[in-house]
Image (spheres, coloured by chain):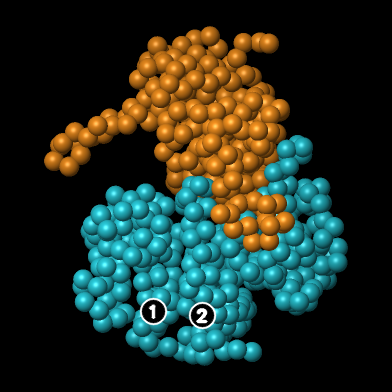
């Protein structure tokens, strides 16, 4: 297997003081130019997984396991080495572009600074390249707009500026954490097209973190579904989205169907467990219409389904036949549980 | 056909910008221009548009949370824009609003039982032991356990908090509910639960609902009739029994194509729309 690209093995993340494990045994692989979509609901650990790659975990969170990028182990890098890698070879964009941009810096200057922090180029050349990048990410009148401040741009344009900054050092991997969640659908469509184009044009790897299956489906080659800190299913995008084998994935996909003939939307009863409240067995079992005693007893292994496709479920054969009615019938005792 | 519950006619609203840099007055764009809408009893009407299109302003003007500059809001035959003070407050009870962010709309220091009780007492809708009975009934209606009474908002997940907000709105015994992006901040598996709850309440209580959102297909699932807004104007109304695919306005079609759909990926592989 090639050592190029990103390899995450058995990554766990814990808040040590509170003794909470929030991510458990996550393994991922993104080859050069590949796009992986990491899907999950809030609290599933998807953002923390992405942040751990660049050592950007919040205070008190500790990662264990292995994160390899182009052959070097990122969890062992000294702070200075990590700082060199950040932006230069692996860049990251976030959900909220306004809070990630310096409000008192003209955007052209901000992008130029990124270029100059990674390469020895003059101010004029850096600014010229900043304008070219703004143009590339679809900002009209880039030359003129490069003198504007972040607040003078709309949310979608700010996200384009963030992408331009991320591209400034020609990274070989881009981590995008919910990059379009704060944006309107029309603007979102533009950003997704841009990410896809850039990936093909620059051969850049992409880790797209999102709660939206359809968004992920549009841009990624492979999809990994996270639930309560674990990856519960992973495989080629079309396999996972159209032939899901883990009941949670099946339920999630059913809940975004908009069948006007149906009287109600399909929904999964209950809500995800709070970190630390999970038992040894399957973490989805309390909400799963197929759960049997064996699901609750022991840790569930990754069950192979097809080439590159696996699910953390011992009832994958029955999962595909699940319908909206099954999920509606799976009543969680006591309704939704409070996250206390 | 009986008389509509509410008719909004030619509503226009411009928010005055205060000051600007060094007190220079910047011209303000109207947030809502000549918008009209009517809603029948036990009907759900959808309102869709991008941010800044005037959806929320329309909702706020209908609920008289903001006073429209021009136009009328006729609720059960009475023009609410003519009312003020105690008269307006008394009518407001009938039109309740729930907002996008259930985290921001609940007082973190109030127990859920007290939140509901406050509304019931304010409107004098029950007394003595009747209050506790009504609180219990409300929690039951929105699918929350009775134990929620003595818990604080922090103990609940986003979907549950939105249920609390819905219970609080119902506590006033409204005839109409304005739901301003009620599921946009929720996880997908929870969104469906809240949408289904609103559909149940419409049927059980005969509530009229204005459901605001930006996902056209989701809104059209819950609301047979959908209004499309762009730059403060209503640009298209998709009537009941008409498919979104027949939408005429260019912007509506753009909205429709922009929402990534799993179904659209099935055939085209990587649906990179060009």
Counting from the top left corner in percent of width and height, residue A127 is at 25, 68
Chain A's colour is cyan
Residue beneath the point at 60% across and 14% down:
B4
A243 vs A53: above or below: above
Q: What residue is pinned by disc 2?
A: A63
- Residue furthest to the left: B22
In front: label 1 or label 2 = 1
Determine which quarter of the picture holds residue B23: top left
Q: Is residue B53 left or right of residue B192?
A: left
Callout 1 crowding tier (Cα within 10 Å): few <14, some 14–19, many ≥20: many
Mark number for residue B37?
none
- Using residue B261 as the reference point, say whether residue A116 is left or right of it: left
Q: Is residue B135 above or below residue A87?
A: above
Residue at horizontal 51 percent and vertical 80 percent from the top: A63
Q: Which residue is mark 1?
A: A88
Q: Which chain hosts label 1?
A: A
- Secondary structure at numbered mark 1: loop
Chain identifier of the residue bearing label 2 in the image: A
Give the image quarter of residue B61.
top left
| Secondary structure state at the residue bearing disc 2 | strand
**Is the residue marked by circle 2 packed among few (<14), some (14-19), or many (20+) residues within 10 Å?**
many
Colour chain B is painted in: orange
Which residue is at a point 77% across and 63% down the rendered structure image? A243
- For the residue pair A280 and A123, the one nearer the viewer reads as A123
Image quadrant where one finds the C terminus of chain B: bottom right
User: Which of these two is toward me, A7 or B78?
Assistant: A7
Answer with the quarter of the image where residue B88 lies.
top left
């Amino acid at each position: 297997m090639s050592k190029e690209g990103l390899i995450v093995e058995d990554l766990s993340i814990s808040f040590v003081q509170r003794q909470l494990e929030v991510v458990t045994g996550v393994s991922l692989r993104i080859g050069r130019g590949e796009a992986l979509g990491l899907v999950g609901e809030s609290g599933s650990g998807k953002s923390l997984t992405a942040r751990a790659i660049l050592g950007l975990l919040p205070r008190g969170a500790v990662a264990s396991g292995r994160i390899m990028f182009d052959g070097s182990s990122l969890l062992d890098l000294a702070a200075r080495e990590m700082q060199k890698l950040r932006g230069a070879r692996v860049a990251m964009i976030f959900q909220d572009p306004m809070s990630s941009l310096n409000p008192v810096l003209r955007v052209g200057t901000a992008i130029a600074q990124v270029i100059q922090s990674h390469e020895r180029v003059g101010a004029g050349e850096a600014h010229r390249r900043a304008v070219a990048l703004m143009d590339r990410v679809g900002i009209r009148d880039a030359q003129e707009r490069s003198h504007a401040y972040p607040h003078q741009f709309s949310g979608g344009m700010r996200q384009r500026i963030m992408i331009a900054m991320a591209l400034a050092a020609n990274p070989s991997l881009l981590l995008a954490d919910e990059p379009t969640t704060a944006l309107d659908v029309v603007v979102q469509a533009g950003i997704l097209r841009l990410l896809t184009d850039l990936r093909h044009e620059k051969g850049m790897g992409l880790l797209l973190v999102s709660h939206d299956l359809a968004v992920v489906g549009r841009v990624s080659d492979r999809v990994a579904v996270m639930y309560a800190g674990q990856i519960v299913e992973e495989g080629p995008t079309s396999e996972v989205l159209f032939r899901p084998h883990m009941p949670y994935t099946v339920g999630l996909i059913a809940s975004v169907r908009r069948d006007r003939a149906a009287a109600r939307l399909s929904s999964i009863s209950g809500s995800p467990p709070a970190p630390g409240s999970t038992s040894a067995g399957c973490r989805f079992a309390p909400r799963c219409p197929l759960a049997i005693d064996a699901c609750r007893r022991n840790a569930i292994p990754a069950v192979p389904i097809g080439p590159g496709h696996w699910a953390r479920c011992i009832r994958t054969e029955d999962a595909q036949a699940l319908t909206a009615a099954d999920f509606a019938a799976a009543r969680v005792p006591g309704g939704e549980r409070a996250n206390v | 056909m009986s008389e509509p519950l509410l008719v909004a006619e030619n509503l226009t609203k411009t928010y005055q910008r205060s000051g600007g840099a060094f007190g220079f007055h910047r011209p303000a764009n109207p947030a809502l221009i000549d918008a009209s809408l009517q809603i029948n009893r036990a009907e759900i009407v959808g309102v869709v548009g991008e941010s800044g299109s005037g959806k929320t302003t329309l909702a706020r003007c209908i609920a008289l949370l903001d006073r429209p500059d021009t136009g009328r809001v006729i609720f059960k035959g009475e023009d609410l824009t003519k009312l003020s003070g105690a008269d307006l407050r008394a009518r407001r009870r009938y039109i309740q609003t729930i907002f996008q962010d259930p985290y921001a709309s609940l007082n973190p220091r109030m127990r859920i039982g007290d939140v509901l009780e406050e509304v019931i007492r304010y409107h004098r809708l029950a007394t003595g032991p009747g209050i506790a009975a009504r609180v219990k009934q409300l929690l039951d209606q929105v699918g929350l356990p009775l134990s929620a009474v003595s818990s604080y908002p922090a103990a609940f997940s986003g979907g549950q908090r939105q249920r609390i907000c819905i219970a609080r709105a119902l506590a006033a015994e409204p005839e109409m509910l304005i739901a301003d992006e009620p599921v946009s901040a929720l996880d997908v598996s929870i969104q469906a639960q809240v949408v289904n709850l609103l559909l149940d309440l419409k049927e059980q209580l005969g509530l009229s609902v204005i459901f605001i959102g930006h996902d056209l297909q989701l809104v059209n699932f819950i609301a047979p009739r959908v209004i499309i807004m762009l730059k403060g104007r209503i640009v298209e109304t998709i009537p009941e029994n008409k498919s979104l695919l027949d939408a005429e306005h260019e912007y509506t079609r753009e909205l429709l194509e922009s929402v990534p759909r799993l179904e659209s990926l099935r055939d085209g592989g990587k649906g990179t729309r060009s």
